[in-house]
Image (cartoon, rainbow, N blue to C red):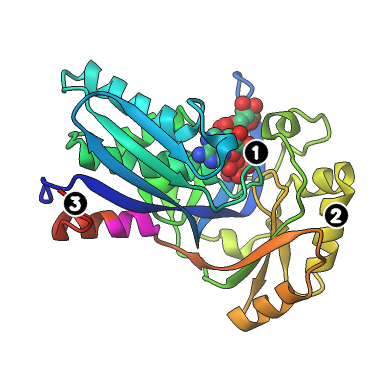
């Protein structure tokens, strides 16, 4: 691999949307079999990674609530250190700074994306010979959404989100609305009224079939504020919940139209306009860094 003297990498961790989300069954361990399409957004957290000579992990976060050892960034770095030890490679460390910009716990996958960017960055900084598939397997233990961020392509996903087929859906402009409601993923997955018997759709013609987010009727009923936001946004554009919510998105033909809707959004919610991306900017930037030695601060 080129770029051997790179000591610091600065990388994005993009948000994702679930363009639809179906449940086709439940596994014996309680996890649900899903079908979904993931697309990335050009809205992201930012992370900086500096290699340390010792095995120390030093983590700082712009959001004090997230600055702790349970952060998925720290857990991802530890998982990679453990892999290195188990594979007779020297333990290395890093100083990691997370500039948290994405709303969290809202179905945008920011935590999983931060974890994926951490795994990708440290593999490169620490020069570990770990395949992308192995990295995705490691990531899956941290969260169901991590593998798609590791592979870096918009994807039709099955299983718990780890069986991925690359797809290239249209890339509209989205208005993402955060209605400021917290929905606990584990709790809503256990709800007795959740629909778990969707007929499977095919990866090659999902866009011509009826799709939905199965959490939407339930979330609407349990959280009237989310129902209000869905009812408001659908007046402007086709609208859906992402993940288990509570964030939702409308699809627009142009940035101007999405911005015009954002300007009229009720003040109690927050929102942003972003473009759909079928390639993750992380993978593009890492390829660039490995050929150009970009951000070389040694
Ligand atoms: C719903 C999605 O957002 C779709 O992209 C993700 O699958 C959720 O991914 P995540 O937030 O990373 O969630 P995880 O940390 O993997 O799982 C949180 C909890 O949700 C439940 N869970 C999650 C994924 C899944 N396929 N079946 C489940 O039943 C489990 O109780 C699990 O303990
Ligand atoms: N780096 C991180 N960024 C955000 N949340 C984190 C991070 N590390 C740990 N967490 C914890 O994980 C929880 C879920 O965050 P995340 O943003 O991944 O969820 P989400 O947007 O609902 O994603 P998903 O679509 O995967 O359910 C947060 O409430 C937070 O307590």
Q: Which residue shows up at 19% across the image and 34% down it?
A: 128
Task: Find residue 24 and name its label.
Answer: 1
Measured Cα–Cα span from mark 3 to mark 1: 49 Å
Left or right position of 253 against 58: right
Which corner quadrant of the image does residue 239 belong to?
bottom right
Magenta span: chief secondary structure: helix
Give the label, 2 or 1, closer to the camera: 2
Residue 257 in sight here:
yes
Q: Position of residue 243 (x, y in %)?
A: 64, 46
Q: Which residue shows up at 68% across the image and 63% down it?
A: 271
Seen from the viewer's position, the closer of residues 98 and 252 is 98
Which residue carries the number 3 mark? 297
Mark positioned earlier in the residue sequence (3 or 1): 1
Q: Position of residue 172 (x, y in %)?
A: 57, 73
Measured Cα–Cα span from mark 2 to mark 1: 25 Å
Q: Which residue shows up at 57% across the image and 58% down it?
A: 206
Which residue carries the number 2 mark? 227
């Amino acid at each position: 691999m080129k770029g051997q003297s790179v000591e610091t990498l600065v990388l994005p961790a993009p948000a994702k949307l679930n363009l639809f989300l179906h449940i086709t069954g439940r596994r014996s361990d309680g996890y649900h079999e899903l079908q979904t399409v993931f697309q990335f957004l050009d809205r992201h957290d930012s992370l900086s990674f500096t290699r340390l000579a010792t095995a120390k992990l030093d983590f700082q976060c712009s959001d004090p609530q997230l600055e702790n050892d349970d952060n998925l960034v720290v857990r991802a770095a530890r998982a990679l250190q453990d892999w290195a030890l188990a594979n007779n490679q020297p333990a290395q460390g890093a100083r990691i700074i997370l500039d948290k910009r994405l709303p969290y716990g809202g179905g945008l996958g920011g935590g999983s994306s931060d974890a994926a960017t951490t795994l990708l960055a440290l593999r490169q900084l620490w020069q570990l010979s770990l395949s992308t598939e192995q990295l995705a397997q490691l990531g899956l233990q941290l969260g169901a959404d991590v593998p798609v961020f590791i592979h870096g392509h918009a994807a039709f996903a099955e299983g718990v989100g780890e069986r991925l087929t690359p797809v290239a859906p249209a890339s509209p402009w989205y208005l993402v609305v955060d209605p400021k409601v917290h929905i606990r993923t584990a709790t809503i997955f256990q709800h007795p009224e959740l629909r778990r018997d969707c007929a499977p759709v095919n990866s090659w013609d999902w866009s011509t079939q009826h799709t939905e987010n199965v959490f939407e009727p339930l979330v609407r009923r349990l959280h009237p504020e989310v129902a209000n936001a869905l009812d408001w946004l659908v007046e402007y554009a086709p609208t859906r919940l992402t993940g288990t919510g509570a964030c939702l998105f409308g699809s627009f033909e142009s940035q101007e139209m999405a911005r015009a809707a954002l300007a009229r959004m009720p003040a109690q919610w927050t929102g942003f306009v972003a473009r759909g991306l079928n390639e993750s900017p992380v993978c593009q930037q890492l390829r660039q860094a490995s050929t150009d030695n970009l951000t070389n601060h040694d």
